[in-house]
């Protein structure tokens, strides 16, 4: 099956200019936050789909510029303005441009459908193998998804947008022009105050809000030496531990399940693994942990205590490295100073944040390296990123393999390359060569 393209239609969340029909219930700020969260969830779902199927993701936006969209949602997506015209003209333009550039089939979805998931996207692309058009009916008589194999402007002309006749009229236009149509499962949109319970129920935020519950997410690959200890320590305080196994050939998954973790198998890169687990998580707070790292005793109390502070976007622990030697202590001191002064902890410091904030940012960018650094920078634009005094204890194997000096040099080269705009693929290739 051709990889295809996913096009997301959204608006930048400016209070008073988005989700206006929800302002009486939520106020301008609340409606904008909901728009932000729904867009982030759609991006997160699209990223998980793209990681498996190598699809291109294009975000068609309104109300801002590409730079601000990239700062909000991450660097690896394509951002283009929707342009002028009514909804039909804008959708026709977006689909037509993608299809004419040979990036089809293309599926366009709105970002106000909380039921959008990987199964829907997969079903839509599968339907386009034998049909010209695929539609996702919405409960209000419109549709939340439209996919095409070739441009079909007839579907977007003279449509009564915003009414309950859109789906019926679109099906009639397709029939009139001899287009084969398939339907995927119907989903509700969130446009009116009475739709809000659908959002809360689908995303699962209402059930955990204020509970302080924590989901620990651990991406893992061939970690049978460390995984049982990692899970056992995390489960001392966490409500759940999700191990996302990247295709281990050893007993990682078996030992994780024996230790009490929930195991999800998803061999598509560390960023995609963590996004996949976040979609399945049930806790109010997400904590991302490396498999060779132990959380400190009583870690959850420290997390919950700091998460209630105003203006906090995320937090992390100080870094502790197992083993003796002045080199390790120097690395710890440098890492913790940078983390506290600049608000830039790394992934091996057990980054944590509210799940709602993670969803609003669209999760980790699908990058082969530096995905944690990139997410922390986006988090820092939304609030403070704090570093706790308590330390995790991480394995010294990375430093022992290459030596402290060489490992530190390689890590700094990664950061420098990132700031110079070198592609993540090139940085990852360089990192693998140096590690060898």
Image (cartoon, rainbow, N blue to C red):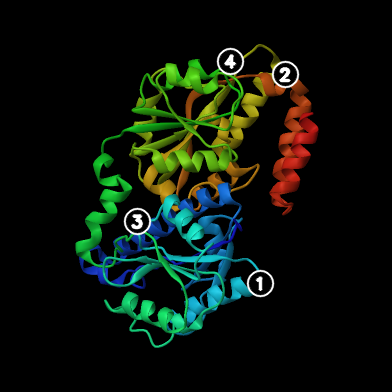
Q: What is the x, y in percent for residue 350?
A: 50, 31
Identify which residue is drawn at 43% across, 41% down. 278
Secondary structure beneath disc 3? loop
Identify which residue is drawn at 56% across, 42% down. 271
CB under 8 Å between callouts 4 and 2? no
Q: What is the x, y in percent for residue 409?
A: 76, 33
Residue 100 lies in what quarter of the image? bottom right
Secondary structure beneath disc 2? helix
Q: Along the line of sight, which residue is nearer the eye, 52 or 345?
A: 52
Q: Earlier in the sequence, mark 4 or mark 3?
A: 3
Disc sitting over residue 101 in the figure = 1
Q: Along the line of sight, which residue is nearer the eye, 205 or 7?
A: 7
Residue highlighted by disc 2: 400
Residue 39 lies in what quarter of the image? bottom left
Q: Which of marks 2 and 1 is nearer the N terminus?
A: 1
In the depicted structure, whether residue 8 falls above or below residue 165: above
């Amino acid at each position: 099956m051709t990889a295809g393209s996913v096009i997301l239609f959204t608006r930048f969340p400016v209070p008073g200019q988005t989700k206006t029909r929800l302002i009486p219930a939520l106020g301008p700020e609340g409606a904008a936050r909901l728009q932000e969260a729904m867009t982030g969830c759609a991006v997160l779902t699209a990223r998980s789909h793209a990681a498996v199927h190598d699809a291109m993701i294009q975000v068609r936006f309104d109300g801002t510029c590409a730079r601000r969209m990239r700062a909000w949602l991450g660097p690896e997506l394509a951002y283009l303005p929707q342009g002028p015209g009514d909804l039909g003209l804008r959708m026709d333009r977006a689909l037509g441009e993608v299809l004419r550039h040979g990036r089809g089939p293309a599926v366009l979805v709105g970002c106000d459908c909380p039921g959008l998931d990987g199964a829907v996207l997969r079903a839509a692309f599968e339907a386009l193998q034998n049909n010209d058009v695929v539609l996702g009916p919405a409960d209000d008589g419109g549709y939340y998804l439209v996919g095409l194999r070739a441009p079909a402007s007839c579907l977007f002309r003279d449509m009564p947008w915003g009414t309950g006749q859109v789906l019926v009229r679109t099906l009639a236009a397709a029939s009139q022009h001899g287009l084969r149509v398939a339907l995927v499962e119907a989903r509700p949109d969130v446009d009116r105050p009475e739709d809000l319970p659908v959002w809360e129920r689908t995303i699962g935020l209402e059930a955990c809000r204020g509970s302080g519950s924590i989901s620990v997410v651990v991406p893992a690959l061939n970690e049978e030496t460390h995984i049982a200890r990692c899970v056992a320590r995390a489960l001392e305080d966490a409500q759940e531990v999700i191990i996302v196994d990247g295709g281990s050939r050893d007993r990682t998954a078996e030992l994780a399940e024996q230790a009490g973790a929930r195991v999800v198998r998803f061999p598509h890169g560390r960023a995609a693994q963590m996004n996949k687990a976040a979609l399945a998580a049930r806790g109010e707070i997400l904590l991302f942990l490396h498999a060779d790292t132990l959380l400190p005793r009583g870690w959850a109390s420290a997390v919950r205590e700091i998460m209630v502070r105003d203006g906090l976007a995320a937090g992390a622990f100080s870094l502790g490295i197992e083993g003796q030697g002045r080199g390790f202590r120097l690395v710890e001191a440098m890492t913790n100073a940078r983390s506290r002064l600049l608000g830039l902890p790394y992934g091996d410091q057990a980054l944590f944040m509210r799940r709602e904030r993670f969803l609003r940012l669209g999760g980790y960018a699908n990058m082969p390296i530096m995905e944690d650094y990139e997410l922390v920078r986006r988090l820092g634009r939304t609030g403070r990123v704090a570093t706790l005094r308590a330390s995790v204890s991480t394995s010294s194997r990375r430093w022992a393999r290459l030596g402290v000096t060489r490992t530190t040099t390689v890590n700094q080269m990664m950061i420098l390359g990132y700031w110079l705009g070198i592609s993540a693929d090139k940085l990852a290739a360089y990192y693998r060569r140096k590690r060898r």
